[in-house]
Amino acid sequence: MRGSDSGHAPHHQHSSTDALEVALTDDVLVVHGGAPLEGRIRVRGAKNLVSKAMVAALLGDTPSRLFDVPKIRDVEVVRGLLGLHGVKVTDGVEDGELVFDPANVESASTDQINVHAGSSRIPILFCGPLLHRLGHAFIPDLGGCHIGPRPIDFHLQALREFGATVDKRPEGLHLSAPNGLHGTKFALPYPSVGATEQVLLTAVMAEGVTELRNAAVEPEIIDLICILQKMGAIIKVHTDRVIEIQGVPKLHGYTHRPIPDRIEAASWAAAALATRGHVEVLGAQQADMMTFLNIFRSVGGEYEVTDARPPKLGDPGQEGGIRFWHPGGELNAVALETDVHPGFMTDWQQPLVVALTQARGLSIVHETVYEQRLGYTEALNSMGANIQVYRDCLGGTPCRFGRRNFKHSAVIAGPSKLHAADLVIPDLRAGFSHLIAALAAEGTSRVYGVDLINRGYEDFEAKLADLGAHVERP
């Protein structure tokens, strides 16, 4: 153990009673920090697309095939939910390939759904497809990361616009469509990714035309539209966040390889920067990460994009990706604000903030997507970081949280020497940020609740080993 290397006794950072309960379990990773991450890892299909693509398979009347599916907990949850509803899910020939046969879709008991879906917010997206296939659907109490309420009001309002009836009961929500689902005109008050997915998955087989205004247009949304189009849907993406869907009476299965996970790619890039390392992320795509790459370079990080090269006779070819590294010297403070696509993604800010603790000067981060996403900074401060959070909209335009009592802006003063700590992970992205901080810090940290990271990062412990990190289970 190298805890004495830092000259500081490890600090304990607990975020809630729930976190304390997690800390008492064996779900802990011991991290010996202070060494750069160096090596090569690969990212697979995007977490924020793959689970929705799996739900889309419910709409087809023939089997679907999905490739490059990561082995993460969210995939296991959706696979279980599909199985409960009669969809036969099998592993394909290729590693990471799943085959979905929806020939025998059926109802599932509320108890079974609750058991499988307790930790996931995906069940809400089953509503449209199940209403089309069965005429009814059930949603249990929804889980997910505790980064803000993320209400399902947008979803329910959209479903009602299509003609669904929502019956609230103690065990959850029961939905039916006694007169079928019909196209509608609908404008989102905020370009919510989840609500946009809900409308797409419902509108494709609703009778008539649906017009969705103020839609989310994230790369994962466009990829879902590609999948639905492959299935026989008619979807037009207009300018100014307007999507038009012409309902069709039936859809067939799809074969699709999803876009790679740009959140995981950026997380490893931030880890390379924070630890003064060098990480090549195979599968990462420049086009979907342009906003992140601009900030990464502004901070002082370097990267190189490697294009894929198909195999030829005598040449095995090469998978494309992006190499990220710390070039030496000091990093630069920056001001940024998160936003919906094409803005700086909210899931990118938490890993990057760890690197910003090592930048000279004052960095400003204005979080405009989730109102409670800066709580993780308390743990970084316990490790020696200097981060202040504010209720004001700092460094940019006023946002919808500016007049409310949410600390959604952060000022990071650096550089700060990080030291070892005992940390408890509160949510998925904050968890990876805590892990990066432990890797960058001098000394030995204990990170509790690391299994939560498995929700979105495939085999992250093996990838850490591939990058030379000194981590172990006690």
Image (tube, rainbow, N blue to C red):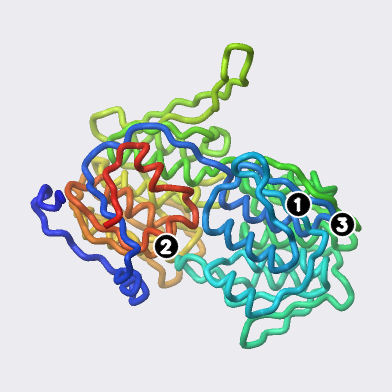
Q: Residue at x 56, y 51 (%)?
A: 47
Q: Residue at x 40, y 39 (%)?
A: 269
**In terms of sequence position, does the residue under pointer 1 or pointer 2 come before the other?**
1
Q: Quick check: 51 above or below 168? A: above
Tell us which disc is closer to us: 3 or 2: 2
Nearest to the observer: residue 62 or residue 195: 62
**In terms of sequence position, does the residue under pointer 3 or pointer 2 come before the other?**
3
Q: Is residue 252 left or right of residue 95?
A: right
Tell us which disc is closer to us: 1 or 3: 3
Residue 9 on image: x %, y %: 12, 59
Residue 226 on image: x %, y %: 74, 44
Q: Are marks 1 and 3 in contact (CB under 8 Å)?
A: no
Q: CA distance from mark 1 to mark 2?
A: 32 Å
Which residue is farthest top?
A: 314
Q: Is residue 141 left or right of residue 271?
A: right
Question: Could one spot residue 298 in this view of the protein?
Answer: yes
Residue identified by numbered label 3: 247
Residue identified by numbered label 1: 243
Q: Circle 3 sits in a helix, a strand or a loop, which is it?
A: loop
**Residue 427's disc number:** 2
Which amino acid, mark 3?
Answer: Gly
Q: How crowded is the residue under tag 3: few (<14 C-alpha within 10 Å), some, or many (20+)?
A: many
Q: How many marks?
A: 3
Q: Residue at x 85, y 62 (%)?
A: 206
